[in-house]
């Protein structure tokens, strides 16, 4: 998907800027042309010569280059690329873009472009978690900016937590995914969900018992990942809220990583409004009422331990019960059952108030939980459709096509 494409690469300041050189090399290896734009802060970590040598193109740094600006060079730069990538995206660059500030070349390009923008944030954990940065993040996501990362990890400042930039191969995959979703001719599929926002939850949740133990389930996240990919391929802007799944998030979607059910609930709230919400995550129904501050120790002669459990938030029911102006047009849930699948799924749809339920058998004999295939029963107010056993990608495409038909009819 990168062959013959042009990436305008804005290199922000920070120790992670050194990865931008590897990114240039990898993008070119995949056939893309790269035009580097180096911020003043980025030039403290990466030299124009090194970026230019790897890109085999001129590096742009100054907004007020008289020759280029006589020809409105910053406008041409911002619109001649297929995608703008900000790597690393610093708190400063995010703030400028979110608030429409155009005081240098990089921020001006972000304001003047009509192309899609990807940001790969990198900053100190406290900067990332600061309310101002989170407000800017929400604004940029609402504007359609796709975020790749950050992830948790060790940082140059010596701290650990979210704020570490994604590795280069993952950034390349995210850029490729964006371009893939922008090119229906290459995929052979139309883009009927263009302009629509889809929210997809996926994977398990981990509910801590103590610092080393947690309550979880066997969900791999494969079905939710496939659904996000299918909706992306049909043109939707996808927000993908995922627990700690085995599957890597799909490229070209806005990924929000969570651990617990409460974190997933908060992430869903932050992602709304949406046109369609598909709740494929296997959210734990219960959590420990009081998480132990230290690892729980068994004592000599102890035969068991009593854990007091409390209910987790019911994300599906809460979103399905929102007022019409705030509720997605289509709310889809899953019912993972081990017996009386259709009966339990039908009851769940009525109890939760959602539009559709995809009920599936996850008993050990089915091999569905964590497996490559799924067999679902689509339950709506009109009745039950029994789908054949299919690969999870095929289930996702069939569901996405049904979503297209329903949203078209709702216009």
Image: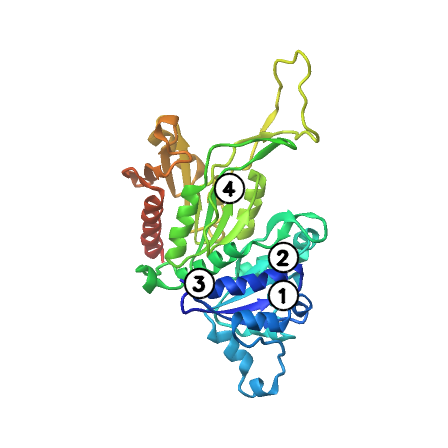
Pointer 3: residues within 10 angstroms few (<14), some, or many (20+)?
some
Q: Residue at 60% across / 55% down in the picture?
A: 165
Q: Residue at 52% across / 73% down in the picture?
A: 56
Q: Report the Cα–Cα distance between label 3 and label 2.
A: 24 Å
Secondary element at image label 3: loop
- Residue 354 in percent (x, y) is at 42, 42
Residue identified by numbered label 2: 122
- Would you say the residues marked 3 and 2 are in contact, meaning their CB atoms lie under 8 Å apart? no
Sequence-earlier tag: 1 or 2: 1
- Would you say the residues marked 1 and 2 are in contact, meaning their CB atoms lie under 8 Å apart? yes
Q: Report the Cα–Cα distance between label 4 and label 1.
A: 40 Å
Q: Residue at 55% across / 61% down in the picture?
A: 22
Sequence-earlier tag: 4 or 1: 1
| Residue at the farthest top position | 301
Q: Residue at 71% across / 48% down in the picture?
A: 159
Q: Is residue 178 above or below residue 372?
A: below
- Residue 11 in percent (x, y) is at 60, 67
Left or right: 118, with 135 as reference point? left
The answer to whether one can see residue 400 in this image is yes
Left or right: 225, with 54 as reference point? left
Residue identified by numbered label 3: 30
Sequence-earlier tag: 4 or 3: 3
Residue identified by numbered label 1: 12
């Amino acid at each position: 998907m990168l062959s013959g494409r042009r990436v305008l690469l804005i290199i922000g300041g920070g120790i992670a800027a050194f990865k931008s050189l590897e990114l240039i090399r990898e993008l070119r290896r995949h056939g893309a042309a790269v035009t580097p734009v180096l911020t003043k802060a980025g030039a403290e970590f990466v030299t124009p010569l090194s970026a230019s040598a790897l890109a085999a193109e001129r590096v742009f740094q100054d907004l007020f280059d008289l020759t280029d600006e006589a020809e409105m060079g910053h406008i041409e730069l911002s619109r001649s690329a297929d995608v703008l990538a900000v790597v690393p995206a610093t708190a400063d660059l995010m703030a400028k873009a979110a608030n429409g500030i155009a005081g240098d070349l990089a921020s001006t390009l972000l304001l003047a472009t009509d192309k899609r923008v990807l940001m790969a944030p990198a900053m100190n954990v406290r900067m990332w978690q600061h309310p101002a940065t989170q407000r800017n993040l929400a604004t940029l996501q609402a504007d359609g900016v796709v975020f790749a990362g950050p992830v948790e990890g060790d940082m140059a400042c010596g701290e650990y937590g979210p704020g570490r930039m994604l590795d280069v191969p993952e950034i390349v995959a995210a850029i490729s995914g964006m371009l893939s979703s922008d090119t229906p001719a290459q995929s052979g599929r139309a883009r009927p969900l263009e302009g629509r926002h889809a929210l997809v939850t996926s994977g398990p949740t981990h509910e801590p018992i103590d610092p080393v133990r947690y309550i979880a389930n066997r969900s791999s996240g494969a079905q939710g990942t496939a659904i996000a990919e299918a909706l992306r391929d049909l043109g939707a802007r996808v927000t993908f809220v995922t627990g700690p799944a085995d599957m890597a998030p799909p490229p070209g979607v806005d990924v929000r990583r969570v651990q617990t059910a409460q974190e997933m609930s908060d992430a869903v709230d932050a992602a709304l409004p949406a046109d369609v919400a598909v709740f494929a995550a296997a959210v734990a129904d219960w959590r420990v009422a009081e998480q132990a501050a230290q690892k729980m120790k068994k004592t000599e002669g102890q035969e068991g331990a009593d854990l007091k459990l409390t209910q987790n938030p019911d994300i599906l029911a809460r979103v399905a019960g929102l007022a019409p102006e705030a509720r997605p047009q289509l709310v889809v849930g899953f019912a993972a059952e081990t017996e009386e699948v259709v009966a339990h799924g039908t009851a769940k749809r009525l109890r939760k108030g959602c539009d559709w339920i995809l009920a599936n058998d996850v008993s050990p004999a089915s091999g569905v939980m964590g497996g490559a295939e799924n067999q679902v029963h689509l339950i709506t107010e009109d009745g039950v459709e029994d789908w054949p056993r299919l690969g999870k990608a095929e289930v996702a495409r069939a569901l996405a096509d049904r979503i297209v038909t329903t949203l078209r009819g709702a216009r």
